[in-house]
Amino acid sequence: MTDTLRANGGPGRRAAATVAVSRVHTGVRYPSDIVVGAVVGDQCGRVVTELLPRPGTGRRS
């Protein structure tokens, strides 16, 4: 998301980090759950942005 929508990068990452810390703090999740989820989410986002055409260009990156 931050690669294509740079304005959302900072607030989006801060929101995700806040939720992650709160989940660990309350004992709902283990820290490893958060790390693995972040890595998987990052990789899924990268795959999707490579597969979809860029807006306004009609072609892939």
Image: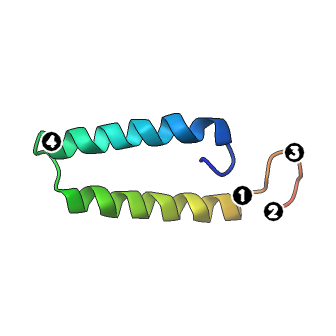
The mark lying in front, picked from 3 and 4, is 4
Instruction: Describe the element under mark 1 as helix, strand or loop.
Output: loop
Q: Where does the image place residue 15, in percent across and percent down from the top left?
A: 41, 35
User: Which residue lies under the disc numbered 1?
Assistant: 52
Tell me whether the residue at label 3 lies in contact with that at label 4, contact meaning CB atoms closer than 8 angstroms. Answer: no
The tag earlier along the polypeptide, 3 or 4, is 4
Q: Quadrant of residue 45?
A: bottom right
User: Which residue lies under the disc numbered 4?
Assistant: 25
From mark 4 to mark 2, how far is it between C-alphas? 41 Å
Q: Where does the image place residue 14, in percent across and percent down from the top left?
A: 43, 38
From mark 3 to mark 2, how far is it between C-alphas? 11 Å
Tell me whether the residue at label 1 lies in contact with that at label 2, contact meaning CB atoms closer than 8 angstroms. Answer: yes
Which image quadrant: the C terminus? bottom right
34 sits left or right of 27 in the view? right
User: Residue placed at 28% from the left, 55% from the top?
Assistant: 34
Q: Amino acid at mark 4?
A: His
> Within 10 angstroms of label 1, few (less than 14), some, or many (20 or more) residues?
few
Q: Amino acid at mark 2?
A: Arg
> Within 10 angstroms of label 3, few (less than 14), some, or many (20 or more) residues?
few
User: Residue placed at 15% from the left, 42% from the top?
Assistant: 25
Residue 56 tag number: 3
From mark 3 to mark 4, how far is it between C-alphas? 43 Å
Q: Is residue 49 above or below residue 11?
A: below
User: Which residue lies under the disc numbered 2?
Assistant: 60
From mark 4 to mark 1, how far is it between C-alphas? 37 Å
The tag earlier along the polypeptide, 4 or 1, is 4
